Amino acid sequence: MICGKDAEAWDYIQIFFWLCTCQEMDLDQLDVNPRVIAAIKRANLKSVREIFNLSQSDLQRVTKLSSVDVQYLLKTISSAVRKKHVLTALQLFKDKNQRRKLSLGCPVLDGFLQGGIPLTGITEIAGESSAGKTQIALQLALSIQYPYKYGGLESGAVYICTEDAFPNKRLQQLIQQQANLRDDVPPIVVQKIKFGNRIFVEHTADLDAFRNCITNRIGILLSRGMVRLIIVDSIAALFRCEFGAKDSVLKAKYLLMFGAKLHELSSQFQIPIVCINQVTDTMDTAGRAVHSPSCTAQRVAPALGITWSNQLLMRLMASRTVHFTQTANDAHQHNRGALRTLRVIFAPHLPQTSCQYTINLEGVRGIKEDILAGL
C-alpha cells in the first residue's frame, strides 16, 4: 500500500504521464453542444491537455459555462480518450484466455505456477546474475511453439535484447535437447517444430530504439500471427545510464509509457509479456546492506522501484541458494551444481511460495519436494 507523500508523488506521476501522452483531439469532433465548443475557443483552450490542466471551477471561470456544461464536457472528453471498454469480473471469469497459461516446459514448475505464465499482463522475472533468468526466458521462447495441448500457443516469440548479445549458442543447445527435456511430448511432434525459425531477435540499446520496437516493429509480427510472446531481457538495462537522481519524474514517465504500451499489446493480441529485471541491494534501518549467505533473494530487491512494480501482473524472483550433490535416482535429471529457487513475490492468483530448480544441458527443471528432501 502506498500512503502519505509517496502516494501524493505517485498520483502526480500518473497524472503527469497521462497529460503528456493523451492524444490531441479535434475539439470540433466532440459530441457536445456547439455553444460549449465556442466557449472553449474563446477561452483560448486549444487542446485536451489544456482543458484537463484546469480544475472544474477554473474551467467554469475561464469559459463562463455552467457547472452542468463543464461536467458533461469533461465526461465526454474522458470517454473519447479512454479507448478500452470496461469489463466486469464475470466477463473476465468467463474469458477462457484468462485461465489459459503458457507452459514453462517443466511439469514441476508449471504445477508451482498453477499452469504457467498468464496470457495477459506483464510477468517479471527478477534476480541476480547467474540466477537463471535468461535460461527461463529461452525455455519460454521454445515452449510457446508447441501445440496447445502441450502448453504452447503454436506461435513464435520476439526476444528483445537490451544489453548483451543474444545467447544463440545456448539456444541451439536447448533446441537439440528438446526431445530429452519434453518427455511429455511425442518425439515426432518435437521433430516437426522448426524452433529456430520462429524466434525473432531485436537489439535495442537505448530508450528510443526500444520505444520504436514495441510501438512499430513488433506490431507487424503480432498482426500477422507470427508471434505470441514478447520477452524483454532486460528492462532495467535501458534505464541504467540514462537517468540521474534528479530525473525521477522523467524516468517514471518512460516506465509508465512502456508499461502502458506493453499492456496494450498484451490485451489486444492476448499474449504474455515477460520482462527480465535486475536487482539492487536492500538496506537496513541503519543504511547498511543486508547480508544473507543462504539466499540472495533476502538481501536484494528488483530494480526500477514502485513505478515499474505497479505495471506488473506477476513478479517472480530467481536466486541461487546452495550447492548440492544429487542422488543416483535423480542423476539423469539434475546435474551437480547450484540449487536455484524461484519465488512468487506477488500475483493475483498465487500465494507467496517457492520452488527449487536446476539448470543443466537440457534446460530448466523444477525439483519435486520428495526428491529435494533426499538431497
Image (spheres, rainbow, N blue to C red):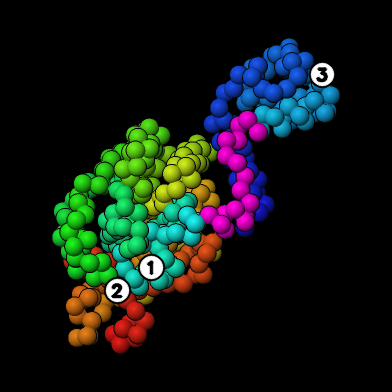
In which quarter of the view is residue 285 placed?
bottom right
Against 272, is 211 above or below? Answer: above
Give the residue furthest to the bottom.
Answer: 374
Dot 1 amino acid type: Asp
Q: Earlier in the sequence, mark 1 or mark 2?
A: 1
Q: Label 3: how many residues lie within 10 Å, few (<14), some (14-19) or many (20+)?
A: some
Number of callouts in the render?
3
Q: Earlier in the sequence, mark 1 or mark 3?
A: 3
Q: Secondary structure at mark 2?
A: strand
What distance separates the C-alpha of mark 1 from that of mark 2? 18 Å
What distance separates the C-alpha of mark 2 from that of mark 3? 69 Å
Dot 2 amino acid type: Leu
Q: Label 2: how many residues lie within 10 Å, few (<14), some (14-19) or many (20+)?
A: many
- Residue 337 vs residue 29, the one in the foreground: 29
How far from the left and from the top, in percent, is residue 367? 32, 76
How far from the left and from the top, in percent, is residue 351? 51, 70
The mark lying in front, picked from 1 and 3, is 1
* Residue beneath the point at 74% across and 15% down: 34
**Residue picked out by circle 1:** 110
Specify the quadrant that holds the N terminus: bottom right
Q: Secondary structure at mark 1?
A: helix
What distance separates the C-alpha of mark 1 from that of mark 3? 61 Å
**Residue picked out by circle 3:** 64
Marker disc for residue 339: 2
